[in-house]
Amino acid sequence: MKIQNTKLATLSATLITFGSLAGGANAALTISNWNKTATTLSFDLTGTITDNNPGSSQQNRLFIGVSGVSIGGDIVSSDTDGVAIENGGSTFATIYPIIFNGFGGSDNDVLQIATAGAPTYNGAVYSVGDTFNYSISFTGLSNGLSVVDEPTISWGRTSYTDAPEAAHNADGSAVPEPSSVILLNLGVLGMIARRKRIS
């Protein structure tokens, strides 16, 4: 009985430690509620920059889309600014979301999030630790249904025609909150203990 209890205690400690580590990994940037129609695009951008490997140029911008494709082709007929930018308590100042029409010679339109004061190429540079909590939307898209699914985020870029780039990926997968992980672990432990009693 003592051995069983020791094993369960060890397993419990391991699972809770793992849960805490998983919860800590939730700090990377995440895109959620990615919704597109023929004429609109909306999404939430949340989390903190934890990646310290930005591209060598345009470190004042985040690039959202799929590597080699960016946001998609023929989404807008001309550069389009975000029309609704709701700050849900970000520690960072105002941002400038914009979809560029075939920017940088690419056949694909490019979605960028610039830092405050940087609607052009100049301006502040993002830093590790910058935090985001924004809801962003665009209207007036000419072919919004061809927007990519499951986009990633890169910080800066090395190539004007291949952003976002995997080498500078700043996004992360959502994981359960530590409290949720602990509850899940307790449920698993309960099932193990019950099984031991039945055996």
Image (tube, rainbow, N blue to C red):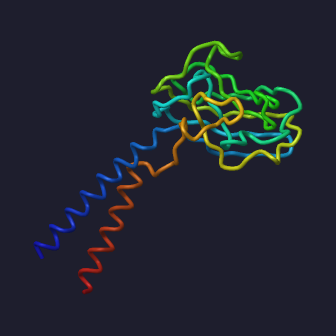
Rendering coords of residue 172 (x, y %): 52, 44
Q: Residue at x 33, y 74 (%)?
A: 191
Q: With 156 as the anchor, is 50 left or right in this view?
A: left
Rendering coords of residue 73 (x, y %): 82, 41
Q: Is residue 121 depicted above or below 144 in this figure?
A: above
Rendering coords of residue 11 (x, y %): 25, 63
Of residues 87 and 164, which is closer to you in this image?
164
Q: With 183 as the anchor, is 63 left or right in this view?
A: right
Q: Residue at x 70, y 27 (%)?
A: 97
Q: Residue furthest bottom?
A: 199
The total number of labels drawn is 0
Q: Quadrant of the N terminus?
A: bottom left
Q: With 179 as the anchor, is 36 left or right in this view?
A: right
Q: With 80 as the anchor, is 112 left or right in this view?
A: left
Q: Residue at x 51, y 28 (%)?
A: 131
Residue 24 position by quadrant: top left
Residue 164 position by quadrant: top right
Q: Quadrant of the C terminus?
A: bottom left
Q: Is residue 27 depicted above or below 173 in this figure?
A: above
Of residues 33 and 144, which is closer to you in this image?
144
Of residues 173 and 120, which is closer to you in this image?
120
Q: Residue furthest left?
A: 2
Q: Is residue 111 depicted above or below 166 in this figure?
A: above
Rendering coords of residue 46 (x, y %): 56, 36
Of residues 153 and 57, which is closer to you in this image?
57
Q: Residue at x 81, y 32 (%)?
A: 102
